[in-house]
Image (cartoon, rainbow, N blue to C red):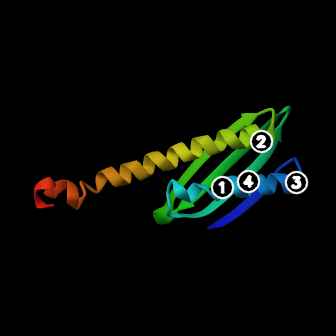
Amino acid sequence: MNFTVNARHMEATDSIHEYLDKKVSKLPRYYNNIKEIEVVLDVEGDLSVAEIIAHAKRKRTFVASAKHENIYAAIDGCLDKITQQLRRFKDKVRDHQGPSHEETMGPESA
């Protein structure tokens, strides 16, 4: 999985890079077909803006953004939004596939 950080109107420090690496590395846990993650950090006036763009297989794109006074809080808010999107999509795909073999056979066959 490729991971890039772009900072606009600000300097992305090493501590921000480490924090993002630690948090973003957990995203494939929610949906494992992620190919690339792009993080965009920006400052608008007094607010810090974080945006996460996750590119998955079959041209699926998940985008989340959050604004907060603190950059770390903006990153956390953005991560909450994108994990919710990924979890919903994974549930949708799993529900679309139908019941498992064990569910269709029932307890009689065991």
Could you tell me which quadrant the C terminus lies in?
A: bottom left
Q: CA distance from mark 1 to mark 3?
A: 16 Å
Q: CA distance from mark 3 to mark 2?
A: 12 Å
Q: CA distance from mark 1 to mark 4?
A: 6 Å
Residue type at mark 3 is Thr
Query: For the point 48% across and 48% down, which residue is it?
Result: 87
Task: Say if 75 sits above or below 107 in the image.
Answer: above
Q: Which mark is first along the chain, 2 or 4?
A: 4
**Pointer 2: residues within 10 angstroms few (<14), some, or many (20+)?**
some
**Pointer 4: residues within 10 angstroms few (<14), some, or many (20+)?**
some
Q: Of 67 and 83, which appears nearest the observer?
A: 83
> Would you say the residues marked 2 and 1 are in contact, meaning their CB atoms lie under 8 Å apart?
no
Local secondary structure at mark 3 = loop
In the displayed image of the protein, which residue is found farthest to the left?
A: 108
Residue under label 1, please give it. Answer: 24
Residue type at mark 4 is Leu
Task: Say if 96 sits above or below 33 in the image.
Answer: above
> Would you say the residues marked 4 and 2 are in contact, meaning their CB atoms lie under 8 Å apart?
no
Q: Disc number at residue 72? A: 2
Task: Give the side of residue 22 with respect to residue 56, left or right.
Answer: right
Local secondary structure at mark 1 = helix
Image coordinates for residue 89, horizontal then vertical, percent? 44, 50
Residue under label 3, please give it. Answer: 13
Task: Say if 19 sits above or below 66 in the image.
Answer: below
Q: CA distance from mark 4 to mark 2?
A: 9 Å
Residue under label 4, please give it. Answer: 20
**Pointer 3: residues within 10 angstroms few (<14), some, or many (20+)?**
few
Q: Which mark is first along the chain, 2 or 3?
A: 3
Q: CA distance from mark 2 to mark 1?
A: 13 Å
In the displayed image of the protein, which residue is found farthest to the front?
A: 110
